[in-house]
Amino acid sequence: MEPQFGNYQDEIYLAALGGVLPSLPMTFAEWEARAQGALSASLFSYVAGGAGDEATQRANAAAFQRWGLIPRMLVGATQRQLSVELFGHTLPSPLFMAPVGVVGLCAQDGHGDLATARAAARTGVPMVASTLTVDPLEQVAAEFGDTPGFFQLYTPTDRELAASLVHRAEAAGFRGIVVTLDTWVTGWRPRDLATGNFPQLRGHCLANYFSDPVFRSRLAKAPEEDPGAAILTWAQLFRSALTWDDLPWLRSLTDLPLILKGLCHPGDVRRARDAGVDGIYCSNHGGRQANGGLAALDLLPAVVEAADGLPVLFDSGVRSGTDVVKALALGATAVGVGRPYVYGLALAGTDGIVHVLRSLLTEADLLMAVDGYPTLDSLRAEGAVRRI
Ligand SMILES: Cc1cc2nc3c(=O)[nH]c(=O)nc-3n(C[C@H](O)[C@H](O)[C@H](O)COP(=O)(O)O)c2cc1C
Ligand SMILES: O=C(O)C(=O)c1ccccc1
């Protein structure tokens, strides 16, 4: 693993003394701007875009400006403690990489899922691998090193296929299953509609299906022989409109921690908790699915309260280490980023992701030092954060 995140600042200043400035940008705005040059126009707009006029996507990021931390002095916060316990694992930091279905395509060599898994191995920041990867989940898991990995399930209508995907993830060593609930239908995405852009329909990122024995058994001809028919079958099976009645079945598929992604309403959180899930994942899919929604961050406090002690993962709009700290102060157990690490990957592969993650973590660590919150518990205590 890399040296402590806090050394990244020293590393950068020391290198500059030797005349070497960072080769990668230091802010989200610049990561995004540079990634636009590195990715094809259609792939960039797929990653950067969201639902409708993208009001919710903007609201996600803007919400962070409406919460402020209140500094504490004379704390002597010389050592910060950022590690967290999550589903029985001790992680070096509370950061994780959210599942991104096309991340595989965003690397120069077209194997971005493997590059992301290698970044997880180097930093201890877990990857939640999407169902939609370029390389099969077994190959992604093989790159995790000692860092626990999580598998995100898009639940197919075919229950045997769902079980097969989950059991493969178990066998490959994934440490939890994240079931995404908010994408059982694709939101209205003007940028993608304008460019006719839906990567999966072009056969991209379907390796987990094409390599699956149950999926293959549903085809008249192997995907290698008739990819068009295989894609069509995928489109028919890809996702089901789950209801609460399906939860016991999902629960019965695995003893691994089960986490539900997309829960934003306290009533849903309480119901999920009662159904025996292990974790709540508060997210509005980065504003890609439903427009017209509240910022995910503003919903987090009520979700944390309803979770009543269950771990709460959070993403949507996190753009800086400061944002990470605010989400933690509002009660998140772990904080996810989507687009930021995808842009890092587009810029410089695994090194680019490591740069983004270390930048976020070092900023978070230094902010906790300056503001006098040496532990996550101190940050979550009454009075650390206030709505502006
Ligand atoms: C290009 C792209 C593809 C995504 N694909 C998936 C996916 O396959 N599964 C999933 O659960 N979420 C997916 N998401 C949503 C992310 O997991 C996450 O909720 C979102 O990106 C967080 O917001 P942020 O990008 O503002 O950090 C995707 C997001 C992006 C940007
Ligand atoms: O692009 C997404 O956000 C996503 O998760 C997705 C995956 C498959 C089909 C449509 C959307």
Image: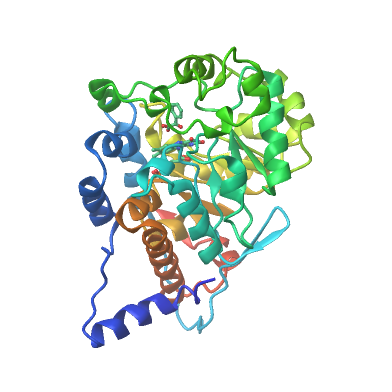
- Across and down, in percent, residue 321 comes to 40, 62
- Across and down, in percent, residue 185 comes to 47, 19
- Foreground residue, 57 or 309? 57
- Foreground residue, 338 or 283? 338
Residue at x 32% of width, y 34% of height: 46
Q: How is the image coloured?
A: rainbow
Residue farthest to the front? 225
Left or right of residue 194: residue 198:
right
Residue 330 seen in the current view: no
Residue 156 seen in the current view: yes
Q: Where is the N terminus found, in terms of image quarters?
A: bottom right
Left or right of residue 360: residue 250:
right
Count of labels shown? 0
Give the image quadrant in which the ligand numbered 2 is located: top left
- Foreground residue, 36 or 93? 36
> Hey, which quadrant is residue 247 in on the image?
top right
| Image: 16 above or below 337 | below
> Hey, which quadrant is residue 363 in on the image?
bottom left
Residue at x 66% of width, y 32% of height: 165
- Across and down, in percent, residue 277 comes to 72, 37
- Foreground residue, 359 or 1? 1
